[in-house]
Image (spheres, rainbow, N blue to C red):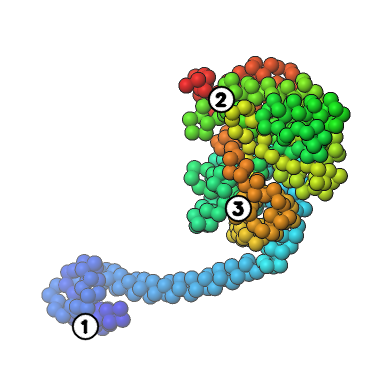
Amino acid sequence: MRQHVENFCDSCWILGGQVNQPQNQSPKFMFETLASGNRFWSISQPVTIVNMVIANLLILSAATRRITLKLIRQIALAATTLLLIFAAAHFIAQGQQPVTIKFLVQAGEANRFAVFAEDFHRKHPNINVEAVKGPNNTNLVEDLYTSAFLLGDSPYDLVYMDIVWVQKFAAAGWLENLSPRLKPVELSPYLDAVIRGGEYQGNLYRMPLRTDVGMLYYRTDFLKETGANPPETFQDLIQVAQELQQNNIARWGYVWQGKQYEGLAAVFTEVLQGYGGYWIDPETRAVGLDAPEAITAVEFLRETITSGVSPEDVTTYAEEEARLLFQNGETAFLRNWPYVFPLANQSDIQGKFAIKPMVHALGLDSGACLGGWGFGISASSSHKDAAWKFIQYFNQPSIQRQYFLETGYVPARRSLFTDPQLVQQYPHYPQLLEVVEQAVLRPPIAQYAQASDILQRYLSGAVTGAKSPRVAMAAAAQETRALLGGELRQRDWER
Ligand code: GLC
């Protein structure tokens, strides 16, 4: 540029007072000529001062522009470097700054996490874990998570989820897709159905921690007194229970979860399977609630009350009410989840009870409802990586072993069912594995919460005797079909 300016000065009468002015050229031509390093040596015609001035200005502005560009480039480089230094410092500082990751969990279970949250914190001093206590009812905890998500930024980083919430939460966009963080080989140690229950549209949204499966608990000492075998079929159960009651061995024959809530849907799922029926086919969306098997299943539940085997109040019982009635020694049979086993074993009935798969219809197999809990990450969390670290921590077999030894819950990882340390403490684990492998999922569909709500309402009507099983289930089926958009597909089960 300097060269161009000198060239221009050489040829300019204004500056050098020379006669070698460019002739009759436009400022643009003069500028381009000068800029390309040529001089104007011969002048035959006078050039206007204006053109020369304009060319001069163009040269100067080009010079300034080049200088400015260079300057801007240097400033930009310095700014970027500074920015990078600040960003790195910020990230390092953030990594070192303590964060608290939170999740909501049923109050009865929250304390079980305390020792693991402490251990995790020791290993990750910048991450605190807080288990916020919620109600002891899966539906209510689900509602609290739902309201938090609907209100916007959820206060929960981790989502401790019942297996039946996953599709709804994932479809709503409330959960982080975990699949990109995992290799398929990390999932293969888990039970297939448990993984399937955590998926939505082929991606994983819930990492399993513990599984659950409905079981029949029975008093071995009571059966010994009458010489009866543990019941196999639904009718056996009613018969043996009545015999025990008539002989004043048991006050109540059978207690189960009859309250209008998710537990009732779980009980019904296994009775329905035991009669060979189905609720909703997740593939075809066919609804089987008004099929003969479903009506017979409801009739059995109602019969437990009309026969006096179950107390009338069973229609208000959740898991805990039923467990306490069994544990206080008055009841022969109980339907519940495996969490009851270690608790009952520390009560007065220690050593006097056993478990077996649920009873079923003659000629068919036992039904078992697959439950269970695991962790997802809230899509709106600002601490997703910290939340993932906690999930990874719980994904270690050694930590899970410790967790099951402490809690007596049931693993989701196959190998732990036969782990020597666990089997020594819980000899019933290998038997549970067989039951869990056969267990059925409640329909894994995004509208599950509404479908379950419909079922719970009509089932409750039928078990309390307010509606006949047939009328109740016809209405439940119709409403479910309307929910799934299949109003015209009546009596799917006949196809
Ligand atoms: C248990 C099961 C869960 C089920 C709930 C019903 O917590 O693990 O899947 O929905 O009971 O009360």
Side (left or right) of 310 relative to 1: right
Q: Earlier in the sequence, mark 1 or mark 3?
A: 1
Estimate the spatial distance between the alpha carbons at disc 3 and disc 2, rounded to whole Å. 32 Å
Q: Nearer the viewer, residue 311 or 233?
A: 233
Query: Which of the 4 image quarters holds residue 57?
Result: bottom left
Q: Which residue is mark 2?
A: 288
Estimate the spatial distance between the alpha carbons at disc 2 and disc 1, rounded to whole Å. 105 Å
Q: Which residue lies at the image location 24% right of the left edge and 68% below the top edge?
A: 27
Q: Which residue lies at the image location 59% right of the left edge and 37% below the top edge?
A: 440
Q: Which residue lies at the image location 65% right of the left edge and 45% below the top edge?
A: 432
Quadrant where the N terminus sits is bottom left
Where does residue 453 sit, x and y in percent of width and height?
A: 65, 30
Give the label on residue 413, or none: 3
Q: Nearer the viewer, residue 291 or 124?
A: 291
Height in image: 206 above or below 88? Answer: above
Give the label on residue 205, or none: none
Mark 3: C-beta under 8 Å from nearest atom of ligand 1 = no
Query: Which of the 4 image quarters holds residue 476?
Result: top right
Estimate the spatial distance between the alpha carbons at disc 1 and disc 3, rounded to whole Å. 95 Å
Answer few, some or many: residues within 10 Å of disc 3's Cα (few below 14, many 20 plus, some between 14 and 19): many
> Which one is in front in this view, the residue at disc 1 or the one at disc 3?
3
Whether residue 249 is visible: yes
Q: Earlier in the sequence, mark 3 or mark 2?
A: 2
Q: Nearer the viewer, residue 417 or 129?
A: 417
Q: Which residue is mark 1?
A: 18
Where disc 2 sits, the SS reads: loop
Q: Say what amino acid the circle numbered 3 marks.
A: Arg
Q: Say what amino acid the circle numbered 1 marks.
A: Gln
Side (left or right) of 256 relative to 87: right
Answer few, some or many: residues within 10 Å of disc 2's Cα (few below 14, many 20 plus, some between 14 and 19): many
